[in-house]
Structures are given as C-alpha cells and as structure tokens.
Amino acid sequence: MGLIKLRDSDVELASWTRFHDEDLENFGRDAAAMLADAEKWARDNGYVIKPKTSFFGSRFSKMTTTYYKEIRVGDGWEDYSIPRKASVLRHEIVHAKQWRHFGRASFGANYIFSARFRWAMEVQAYRESVRAYRVLGAKEDWLRNYATREVPDVLWQNYMLGVLRKGDVYEHAARILLRAA
Ligand SMILES: [Zn+2]
C-alpha cells in the first residue's frame, strides 16, 4: 500500500469550491434541462464532446475524461440515464475549469505525474457530481453512500492512487464530498 501521506495543502486544494460557480448553479433543476445546459455550456465555451478513441486502451475506455478542450465520453455513454449524463458533464466542466485555471502544460503534467494533485482535482470534480445529484433530488442515504463509499472506491480503483495512503484517499475525500451531499 502507498506510503505518501496527503498534506494539508492537498486537502485544501481538494476543498476548493471556486469552480463550482454560478455557471453551474444556474443550470436546470431537472435532469433533461441540466443536461441541455451542460451541453450548451460546453458549446459556448469552445469545448467539443466526442467519443473516446481507442488510444486510451480498454482500461480507461469506460470513463469520460476532459483533455484540455475536449470532453471525451466513454463507452456506453448512450446508455447512461439522463441524470447520470448531467452529473458526469457537470463533473467534466469542473475539469475544464481546472485546465483553464492551471494552464495546459501545468495541469497536464501535474495530473499525470502527481497522485496527490490528481486526487485533489478529482475530489473537486466529484464534489460537483454530488451537488448535481442533490439538485436532481437524490435521497439523503443514497447521497451519503455515494459521497463516503462509492466515489472513494472509484477514486482508489480508477485513478492510480496506489502510492498514496489508502486511508487518506478515503477519509479526506469522504469528508469533503459530504459537505456537498
Ligand atoms: Zn474526473
């Protein structure tokens, strides 16, 4: 198991709410309207939403990712429920704002090479996923489980965070995500 401890500065970075701004606050309150607004935001801000290429390989082909100006949706996107699509796009819009804030070279390098940075950026973005589901009327128990179990599991399993202490990855993420639940 990983030995790298998350620092206070990582937790502080993961707790940022500056990308959870009024653009997102003003999106529709039902799933179809929220999804339409997210797609419109992407268009208006120069992003393209397109399917992933096989370049990423099968391991990551299911996950939607944002690479600078492209939001690449994963396999099975067409089968997602409308609320899930809306939540995923709101998550990706946070990543789009992160790319813009940190700059292409800095964000790209840090995201690839620093597990601590990658953890912090994903917690910021998953907090928006939680917010989206809350707006869409998800039940409190479901949200609590999503924030404290489901997302920390996804973080641990899918984002190559094995160099970090597992307890840190889970506990700090759960605490931050609960604030949005
Ligand atoms: Zn993400």
Image (cartoon, rainbow, N blue to C red):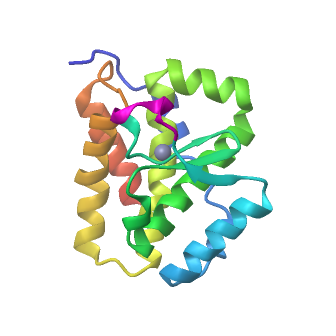
Q: Please name whichever residue, 54 or 36, is drawn nearer the observer in this view of the structure.
A: 54
- Farthest top residue? 3
Q: Please name whichever residue, 56 or 110, is drawn nearer the observer in this view of the structure.
A: 56
- Farthest front residue? 54
Which residue does the image show at 74% across and 32% down from the upper left?
103
- Counting from the top left corner in percent of width and height, residue 80 is at 38, 66
- Counting from the top left corner in percent of width and height, residue 1 is at 20, 18
Q: Can residue 130 be spotted in the picture? A: yes
- Counting from the top left corner in percent of width and height, residue 172 is at 35, 41
Identify the main secondary structure in magenta.
helix
Q: Can residue 17 be spotted in the picture? A: no
Which residue does the image show at 62% across and 75% down from the upper left?
36
Q: Seen in the image, is 8 located left or right of residue 92?
A: left
Which residue does the image show at 34% across and 50% down from the upper left?
175
Answer above or below: position of 117 versus 130. above
Which residue does the image show at 50% across and 68% down from the upper left?
86
Q: In the image, is residue 108 part of the stretch drawn in magenta?
A: no
- Counting from the top left corner in percent of width and height, residue 19 is at 64, 53
Q: Seen in the image, is 156 located left or right of residue 64?
A: left
Quadrant assignment, res 34: bottom right
The region drawn magenta spans: 53-59
Q: How many marks on residues?
A: 0
Of the 4 image quadrants, the one containing the C terminus is: bottom left
Quadrant assignment, res 108: top right
Answer above or below: position of 156 versus 21. above
